[in-house]
Amino acid sequence: MLSDAIKYFKTTRFKTTLWYSAVFLLLEVVIGFVIYAYLKHNLYDELDVSLSKQAKMIYRFVKESNVDLQEFKSDSIYSSPNELVYDLIFEAVALNPKNTFVQVSYKNKNIFSTANLMENILKNPDSTEVHSGIYTFADTLLSKHIIRAAYLDKEGYKIIVAFPIQLIDQTLESLTDIYILIAPIFLLFSLIGGSIISFRALNRIDKIIKETNEITAQNLTKIIDGGDFNDEYGRLVTTMNKMIQRIKTAIDYMNQFSISASHELKTPLTILRGEIEIALKSKKTPAEYEAILRSNYEETLRLINIVEHLFYISKLDYSLVKIEKAPTELAAIVQDSVKKFAGVAENKNIKLIFNCDVPDNFKVNVDASLIKRVIINLIDNAIKYGNENSDVVIKAGKNKDGKGLISISNYSEPIPQEILPKLFERFYKTDYSRNRELGGIGLGLSIVKSIVEIHEGNIAVKSREDGFIEFVITI
């Protein structure tokens, strides 16, 4: 049970739920802070406006009365300036909450204070304490809360209208309590919502996993459903189907390669076995034994050649061939390769023609020894399979992008267009008996293609019905 829970905690479904809940709660907290800050700002702003309006109203009432408060004398109606001022500003303070403090001074003499101030006198603030006519102060004798006040200093009058921020604090505290109360509810809903969303989002992943697990080497033709959806899951399914197709192609290729390699190795081994059996059945003359040994030697060389080619191809496939690239003159590489076949071509009455369309200083960044191997292989094929008394034309040039071009062309038996792409497949031969007679094993062009590709180049072949064939390398 515990192990199942631990496994679930490690699943993407749980992590998605957790992330969803975290984001949801973070959003709630952010919204809560925004509402808190907005409400606090509005409450303070409304209080400041109210206090400022009252201070201005008190000033206006006192100023418009034209009463000389400095020379006040008691009479039967007003026994003190406080009573007189209260009567003047009654309209402004009558509806004040009981904890609103009002103090009016005239020429540094206190002429009015609300009863709730008792004997306390509010200290006039410094100019540095007042901002836009508003300031705050603390006075525990009046209130245990911070007091916010409007201050008006004009024409000898100094008016203070103050109010404790108790109600604002209580409102904000109530809001905080509400958020604390509903936070667990939000958490519960976010977990439920996250679970539902993650289940629905990852349910298709479970189906993909199930269908993928059903695919084996024997049913690689099976297609995972869902590739027609135009979303991330559809793209995932499409990618996996393409990967499965590539795996199938690779396995088919490996199977075909194994069959071809076995067949290619079987032939010389069968010949060796047959000749050895003949030699053992009866006594032979020294000349006959020599002939058998010579034949065995040729087949052994053929086996060695096949194994060496297979080993080299494997090294190319796994990037084990050391490549030493360096800027090298293209014309020199091609010309050196052509010179090696002067005698061979002459024996077959084939003329080698070298055309160079690039300056001597035109260089390509290649491994010269590997590129020479490519050129030598192609020229060797052109001479072996070309028509007698024909020409093999070798060209060196460059394309419009400034890359090097090498082409080898000749005339031989026509090759159908559908065969051309297969020429670079391993062990593929257009004419098996002829290829064997000339010593071919069907691996040379595959090696050529691999070498060109590790140089990030390209090789193409063109053929015509009249037997013209041309290999073009771009490096």
Image (tube, helix red, strand yellow):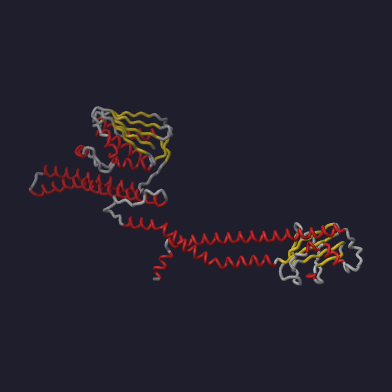
Locate residue 443: give its quadrant. Answer: top left
Q: Is residue 387 left or right of residue 453?
A: left
Locate residue 466: give its quadrant. Answer: top left
Q: Is residue 328 left or right of residue 435?
A: right
- Up-down: is 178 above or below 320? below
Looking at the picture, tell me which residue is in the foreground, 321 or 19: 19
- Up-down: is 429 above or below 123? above
Residue 187, horizontal then vertical, whole percent? 51, 65
Looking at the picture, tell me which residue is in the foreground, 426 or 376: 426
Looking at the picture, tell me which residue is in the foreground, 392 or 40: 40
Residue 243, horizontal then vertical, whole percent? 35, 50
Residue 170, horizontal then vertical, whole percent? 66, 67
Looking at the picture, tell me which residue is in the foreground, 284 or 375: 375
Pick the quarter of the image with the C terminus: top left
Q: Is residue 251 left or right of residue 48?
A: left
Residue 148, horizontal then vertical, whole percent? 73, 64
Total numbered labels:
0
Q: Residue at x 40, y 71 (%)?
A: 2
Pick the quarter of the image with the N terminus: bottom left
Q: Residue furthest left?
A: 282
Q: Residue furthest front?
A: 76
Q: Residue furthest top?
A: 389
Locate residue 446: give its quadrant. Answer: top left
